[in-house]
Image (cartoon, grey):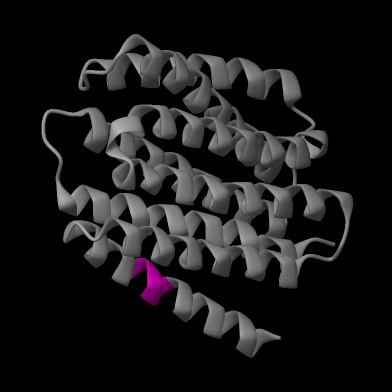
Amino acid sequence: MQGILIVLLIVCAVLARVFLRAESRGEYVKAVVLKGLASLCFVVIGLVCSPGTHVAAMIAAGLIIGSIADVLLNLRMVFEEKGQLIFLVGIVVFLTGHIMYLAAVLPLCPYKLACIIIGIVLTALLMVWIFSRVTAKPAFKIFGVVYIGAIMLLNCVAVGNVIAEQSAFNTVFAIGAVLFLVSDIVLILNTFGSEFRQSLRNTNISLYYAGQLLIAFSLSLLA
């Protein structure tokens, strides 16, 4: 099984790289297909690694939902006239995936109240900082607060689990969640900032796939 996982990891990295190249060249239909295939890799890794427990099933569901959101977010470039609507739908789907992750790891957390309070405070501070650097319509700001709030809470719970029990699963999952959060922050700044930068897009995608792959691999570490 280890050989299969390594092959899937390499294929995912190659597809993500080719996807970025196609997107930067304006080949948006090709880019959607490539991104979907790259995301399918972390889904398959998660399913292969899953021990079949309830926690694993919730995380695997989050991976599947995330792969669907990946395709939706890039479809906005194919159907530009409905780009904003597609983007918002994609964010809602991603939010659903984060909720699945949260539902999986929250019951494992002995510090639920503390994590929720810290998550709310950190979300408020982060959104104030982000809004000072981007320009977005009210609808996007509302979605942004809810979305970032959910992933920030996920990160607080994941880190709280590591503090409570420094298991391999908790550690790898938490690192994946943190990378996911950072990738989303980069995405927001690059999408709604004053200037789009391909270097930031590359960073966003690299961090995103690293995060999702770690979350998928963490399933092999579940007891």
Percent position (x, y) of residue 183? 38, 45
Q: Is residue 184 magenta?
A: no
Percent position (x, y) of residue 220? 73, 68
Prevalent SS, magenta region? helix
- For this view, does 128 lie left or right of residue 158? left
Residue 126 versus residue 24 in the image, above or below? above
Q: Quadrant of the C terminus?
A: bottom right
In this rendered view, identify the residue nearer to me: 149 or 196.
Answer: 196
Q: Residue at x 27, y 62 (%)?
A: 20
Determine the image quadrant of residue 47. bottom right
Percent position (x, y) of residue 166? 70, 52
Q: Is residue 14 magenta?
A: yes
Determine the image quadrant of residue 85. top left
Q: Residue at x 25, y 35 (%)?
A: 191
Residue 210 versus residue 130 in the image, above or below? below
Give the magenta part as a residue range: 13-17
- For this view, does 146 lie left or right of residue 44? left
Q: Residue at x 22, y 22 (%)?
A: 134
Q: Is residue 166 something that shows in the picture?
A: no
- For this view, does 91 lie left or right of residue 126? right
Residue 49 versus residue 169 in the image, above or below? below
Q: Residue at x 42, y 64 (%)?
A: 33
In this rendered view, identify the residue nearer to me: 75 or 95.
Answer: 75
Determine the image quadrant of residue 161. top right
Percent position (x, y) of residue 170? 68, 51
View extreme (left): residue: 195
